[in-house]
Amino acid sequence: MEERKLTCIGCPMGCPLTVTLDGGAVVTVQGNTCPRGDAYARREVTAPTRIVTTTVRVTGGTLPAVSDIPKEKIFDVVRALKSVVVPAPVHIGQILLPDAAGTGVDVVATKDVAEV
């Protein structure tokens, strides 16, 4: 049996988690105070993922980068995104929020999500 200790990032509580594995399979998750902690721990020890956010530089264009959000507009964009709910199916390239907070930047889906 193997034991791994994690700090949950599923919500602001930051619960200390202990995951017990047997041959790479999760046996138990302890320390979580909500179901998100259990789900996070299982995912993190078996198939961890990360979200990567970045901009892409442009040469010879009218702007220096693709999807560059002005610093003073970041909180406006985040507030605008809080109200966005998209029904499945979602397709790569689909515009989810056009002209986010008046920046001229569209928020675009970067992953397909199938309907259940």
Image: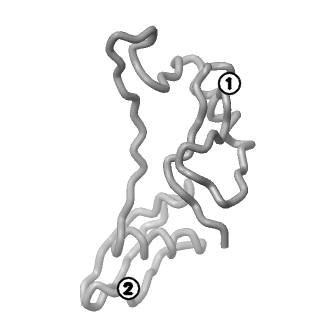
In the rendered image, the vertical position of residue 53 relative to residue 87, given as above or below: above
Horizontal side of residue 68 vs 91, given as left or right: left
Horizontal side of residue 2 vs 17, given as left or right: left
Q: Where is residue 18 in the image (x, y as percent from the top left)?
A: 38, 76
Q: Residue at x 63, y 30 (%)?
A: 77
Q: Name the residue under label 1.
A: 101
Circle on res. 53: none
N-terminal of the pair, mark 2 or mark 1, is: 2
> Can you tell which of label 2 and label 1 is closer to the viewer?
1
Which residue is nearer to you in this view: 103 or 74?
103
Q: How is the image coloured?
A: one colour
Q: Residue at x 37, y 85 (%)?
A: 26
Q: Quadrant of the N terminus?
A: bottom left
Q: In which quarter of the image is the C terminus?
A: bottom right
In the rendered image, the vertical position of residue 25 relative to residue 83, given as above or below: below
Q: In which quarter of the image is residue 34?
A: bottom right
Horizontal side of residue 77 vs 30, given as left or right: right
